[in-house]
């Protein structure tokens, strides 16, 4: 388990990572260097960091419930009126038709501003804010869970690659030895010291060795690809892993206590309980029939 001490140590390594990268050509890769690369480049970890930033925005949204709400309205319109009247004048000129037109343009407009301040709504704003804060804390612990898994995967990929490389080298040397043994067995067969069965057995051992070599090569290529997937860079020459005993508790009882109090999975679950309780309180506040607000 990665506690706060090892995590702080890893963050310190991340700060000096550019120097480690610059000197990589002059030295072999170390486990610490690989963990730093995984911490910076792993896509799952970067995605979880982005999710945490999105969760952080819930807090200012919840705090907005304490602030006044201002609404502005505006309207405008245009009216046109036109009327044409027709009349006949029989007094001066018989059958004289007179047309009269009346028109008018009328524009209307208006605006209004309304400010509302919530005074009491069943403590929904307070519970919303506490709920958002608990969500942020839970998201942080979830990020720590992802960090632990990514770093464990990185260490596993690093050590697996060292193991498979050693197995591959061993199988290569084994094939070389078996090839030489087959040559010697054939020479002895030519002079009559061994039988054809001995030659066939040597050939069988060499075929089995070559088959094991092909399997070791396949495992080594797979480990290289897994190293690239988890850590984000191609593997170079790897130094042996370093012990982590100095980062572990000295006794089992202390490890259990630290796990119960510092494990991000436990803490995330505890914050999840708080979130559920606050959700109930928000629903209870919404059911209260009395609410007060001030409007201007």
Image: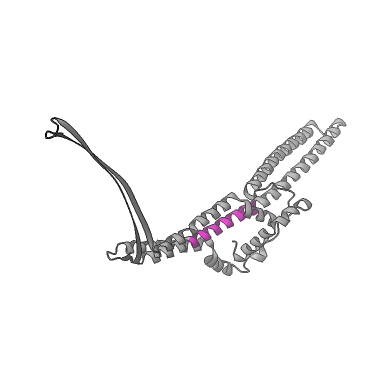
| Residue 83 percent across, percent down from the top left | 22, 39
Closest to the observer: 164 or 138? 138
- Residue sitting at 16 percent across and 31 percent down? 96
Considering the image in quadrants, where does the C terminus appear? Answer: bottom left
| Residue 89 percent across, percent down from the top left | 14, 34
Q: Work out whether residue 83 can be spotted.
A: no
Closest to the observer: 173 or 82? 82
Q: Is residue 148 magenta?
A: yes
Left or right: residue 191 compared with residue 206: right
Q: Main secondary structure of the magenta part?
A: helix
Colouring style: one colour
- Residue sitting at 61 percent across and 51 percent down? 42
| Residue 49 percent across, percent down from the top left | 55, 55
The quadrant in which residue 188 appears is top right
Single out the residue that lies furthest toward the left. Answer: 91
Considering the image in quadrants, where does the N terminus appear? Answer: bottom right
Closest to the observer: 70 or 30? 70
Q: Is residue 43 magenta?
A: no
Give the residues in magenta.
136-156
Left or right: residue 197 compared with residue 38: right
Single out the residue that lies furthest toward the front. Answer: 92
| Residue 270 percent across, percent down from the top left | 46, 64
Left or right: residue 252 compared with residue 266: right
């Amino acid at each position: 388990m990665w506690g706060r001490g090892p995590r702080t140590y890893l963050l310190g390594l991340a700060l000096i990572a550019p120097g480690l990268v610059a000197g990589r050509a002059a030295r072999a890769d170390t486990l610490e260097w690989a963990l730093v690369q995984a911490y910076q480049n792993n896509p799952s970890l970067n995605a979880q960091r982005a999710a945490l930033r999105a969760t952080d925005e819930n807090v200012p949204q919840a705090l907005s419930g304490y602030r006044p709400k201002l609404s502005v309205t505006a309207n405008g319109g245009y009216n046109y009126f036109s009327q044409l009247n027709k009349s006949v004048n029989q007094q001066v000129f018989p059958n004289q038709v007179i047309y009269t037109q009346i028109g008018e343009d009328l524009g209307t407009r208006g605006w209004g501003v309304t400010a509302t301040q919530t005074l009491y709504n069943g403590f929904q704003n307070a519970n919303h804010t506490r709920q958002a804060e608990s969500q942020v804390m839970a998201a942080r612990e979830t990020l720590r869970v992802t960090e632990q898994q990514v770093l464990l995967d990185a260490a596993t990929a690093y050590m697996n690659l060292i193991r498979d490389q050693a197995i591959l080298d061993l199988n290569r040397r084994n094939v070389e030895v078996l090839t030489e043994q087959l040559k010697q067995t054939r020479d002895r067969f030519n002079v009559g010291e061994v039988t054809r069965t001995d030659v066939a057995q040597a050939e069988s051992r060499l075929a089995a060795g070559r088959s094991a070599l092909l399997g070791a090569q396949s495992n080594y290529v797979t480990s290289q690809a897994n190293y690239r997937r988890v850590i984000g860079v191609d593997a170079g020459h790897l130094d042996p892993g370093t012990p982590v005993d100095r980062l572990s508790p000295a006794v089992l009882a202390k490890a259990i206590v630290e796990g119960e109090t510092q494990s991000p999975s436990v803490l995330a679950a505890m914050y999840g309980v708080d979130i559920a309780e606050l959700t109930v309180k928000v629903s209870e506040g919404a059911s209260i029939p009395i609410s007060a607000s001030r409007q201007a």
